Image (spheres, helix red, strand yellow):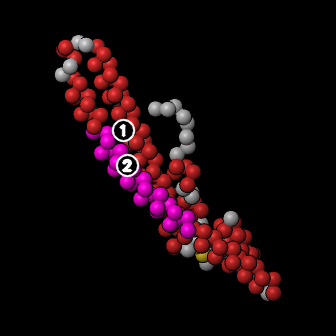
Amino acid sequence: SLGIAVPSMEAMLAVPPEIIYRSVGPEHNPRALLTAAEAECLLKVALSAQELDVLLQLAEESLNQQLLCRTYKQRLRKSNHPLLYPVIPIVHLMEKQAKPELQHIKHRLSELLAEFSASASILRQSAEQNWTLADSLMHALDTIESSTSDQSLVQEKRSLAE
């Protein structure tokens, strides 16, 4: 382990559930703040971030295993002790085990990055739509007498877009 404290990807990327499932409007007729597509996208990002945390942990463990095995092999060879020679192939095999794991992790990381990119595009489009909706509602509300819940929706949509 490098000993570097890094916050989890989930902590950095996940939107709290109370935001995802938030409703606005009067209690007798609440409306979901997010569309189903927006909520689904945010939940997918959170799940992908959890998976990313697990993959990064697995990669660290595999790399540490490789490094440890290489170190042991070097020490065993330098020891010149004949009773330790049979251990070298075992250590070599353990080192080789980490390579397929790392290849799988690398492949899945590439897939996750593509998923994050697609989610970012969807969320960017949603933010633009929320800005447009908030502006349209604001102009409409300026011309008519509006309720507090309508104004609340405008504020929530603006906040969401940010």
Q: Are marks 1 and 2 in contact (CB under 8 Å)?
A: yes
Residue at which label 1 appears: 62
For marks 1 and 2, give the CA distance: 10 Å
Q: Is residue 111 magenta?
A: yes
Q: Is residue 24 left or right of residue 20?
A: right
Residue drawn at x 30%, y 24% is 73
Residue drawn at x 28%, y 19% is 77
Q: Is residue 32 left or right of residue 147?
A: left
Q: Is residue 4 magenta?
A: no
Give the camera-side residue of 90 and 143: 90
Magenta span covers which residues?
97-121
What is the x, y in percent for residue 19?
59, 62
> Which secondary structure, mark 1?
helix
Task: Give residue 128's quadrant in the image.
Answer: bottom right
Give the camera-side residue of 62 and 7: 62
What is the x, y in percent for residue 15?
57, 58
Task: Give residue 125's quadrant in the image.
Answer: bottom right
Q: Report the amino acid beneath label 2.
A: Ile
What is the x, y in percent for residue 62?
36, 38
Magenta segment, prevailing SS (helix, strand or loop): helix
Residue at which label 2 appears: 105
Residue drawn at x 60%, y 68% is 124
Please state, as top left, top right, bottom left or bottom right, where the C terminus lies in the image. bottom right
Give the camera-side residue of 34 and 8: 8
> Which secondary structure, mark 2?
helix
